[in-house]
Image: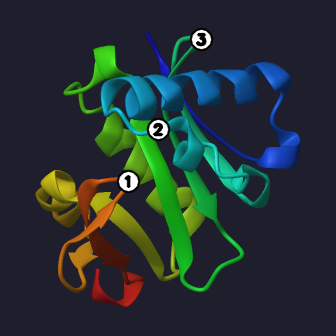
Amino acid sequence: MSERFVCKHFRELTLDELYDVMVLRNDVFVVGQKITAEPEVDGRDRECHHGLLYVGDELVGTARVFCDKDPVKVGRVAVARDRQREGLGTRLMEAVQRELLADRRAALHAQAYLEDWYTRLGWRRDGEPFDEAEIPHVLMRWDPTNR
């Protein structure tokens, strides 16, 4: 099946797309990682562009990007639990980096166990680990001048 990446600001999402994003993130973060729904649904999605990765008609990955920030802030990177370890997360982040970051600096809070993966994608750790939603995280930075 063919893959496609779509990027839309919150205001451009259809109700079905928004619903699919929320279902995917709920399954990954709330069900899979036991994060309470309160920090997941934080009211900030309206400020973001949303990267959507589809295989056929199925939403398999998503990320939200605060393009108006300096540096750009990337968050809520999620791949469907039954599709993880297929390289979809890498393709999602490569598309986000290519289409939303390009030559702009960015930051994200990565779950600590994913630090090596983000490093392979060109991100660099900045600082010491910290807890967010009771999960160890690290601050990662994207600097296009270091590519």
Whole-angstrom CA distance, mark 1 to mark 2, is: 8 Å
Looking at the picture, which amino acid does disc 1 mark?
Answer: Ala
Whole-angstrom CA distance, mark 2 to mark 3, is: 28 Å
Task: Write down the residue under mark 3.
Answer: 57
Whole-angstrom CA distance, mark 3 to mark 1, is: 31 Å
Quick one: label 3, few (<14), some, or many (20+) residues within 10 Å? few
Task: Write down the residue under mark 2.
Answer: 36
**In the picture, residue 84 is in which quadrant?**
top left
Q: Secondary structure at mark 2?
A: loop
- Quadrant of the frame with the N terminus: top left
Q: Which residue is at a point 31% across and 33% down the rendered structure image?
A: 33
Judged left or right of residue 80, residue 48 is right
Q: Are marks 3 and 1 in contact (CB under 8 Å)?
A: no
Looking at the picture, which amino acid does disc 3 mark?
Answer: Asp
Q: Confirm whether residue 79 shows in the render.
A: no
Identify the coloring.
rainbow
Nearest the camera: 145 or 38? 38
Looking at the picture, which amino acid does disc 2 mark?
Answer: Thr
- Residue 51 badge: none
Nearest the camera: 135 or 140? 135
- N-terminal label among 1 and 2: 2
Nearest the camera: 125 or 5? 125
Nearest the camera: 18 or 132? 132
- Residue 133 badge: 1
Q: Are marks 1 and 2 in contact (CB under 8 Å)?
A: yes
